[in-house]
Image (spheres, rainbow, N blue to C red):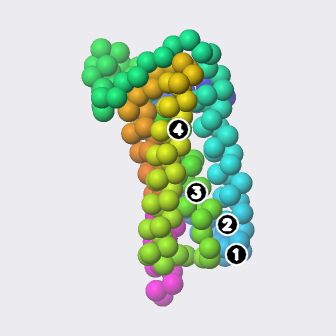
Amino acid sequence: MFYYIYRIPLPITVIIIAAAVVGWALIMRFSARRGAAAVRAINIILVFIALGGILYITLHHRLPGQRELILMPFHSFIEAKAEREMYREMLMNLFLFVPLGVTMPFALLKNGVPASSQRLKNILVTVAFALILSLAIESIQYFFALGRAETDDVICNTSGALAGILSFTIYSACGKRNNDH
């Protein structure tokens, strides 16, 4: 399945991800009417599915043999000038963590629309978790010679989680506006 996703033209992939982020916020807003517990439960399950997908794609299908470490941030942009496929790889690394960013802040919800301090806490916990997870994956890839471990992957993965968090931000903004009326 990932192969088919990887082959979708990049502009269409970007549109699909953007629509999914906004759509998830709207779905969660509608679901919140049924209760915060339902929103939280659905998203806890989806966080584990997202984690499984991330680990499967980044670790499972790789064979040991190549160990490369690139610590220079944004080195992929230099490589992409010569090899344009690098842009797709960076974007796919970003997209890989969007589902985690979309679901984790909702999984951390304790009740309906969170106060600004709770909203910020959920966002920070999600970003920190994505960063640590990405660092762990890159470390495992390096130590077990499962391919290239690079700073740019960590940057792209964490940026993907941030892009997914936009869904939570939209949800929170809609709830705040609805509560103001």
Q: Separation of disc 4 and disc 3 at Cα? A: 18 Å
Residue 170 in the image, given as x and y percentages of width and height? 47, 64
Residue 16 position in % (x across, y down) = 52, 42
**Which residue extends farthest top?**
65
Question: Few, some or many C-alpha atoms within 10 Å of disc 1 (few <14, some 14-19, many ≥20)?
Answer: few
Closer to the N terminus: mark 2 or mark 3?
2
Viewer can see residue 137: yes
Q: What residue is shown with label 2?
A: 39
Q: Image check: 143 left or right of 41?
A: left
- On the image, the x and y values in percent for residue 63 come to 62, 16
Q: Where does label 3 land, which residue?
A: 104
Q: Amino acid at mark 4?
A: Ala
Magenta segment, principal secondary structure? helix
2 or 134, nearer to the observer: 134
1 or 4: tag closer to the N-terminus: 1
| Residue indicated by mark 1 | 35
How packed mark 2 is, by other alpha carbons closer than 10 Å (few <14, some 14-19, many 20 or more), is many
**Up/down of 23 relative to 95, above or below:** below
Task: Read off the magenta span.
Answer: 167-181
Q: Amino acid at mark 2?
A: Val
Give the residue at mark 4.
136
Decide: marks 3, 1 in contact (CB < 8 A)? no
- First-in-chain label (4 vs 3): 3
Q: Do residues under tags 2 and 1 come within 8 Å of each other at their CB atoms? A: yes
Q: Identify the residue at horizontal 58%, vertical 57% (top origin).
A: 104
Q: Give the mark, 3 or 1, whose residue is nearer the N terminus.
A: 1
In this view, the mark in front (2 or 4): 4
Instruction: Confirm whether the magenta stretch covers residue 172.
Output: yes
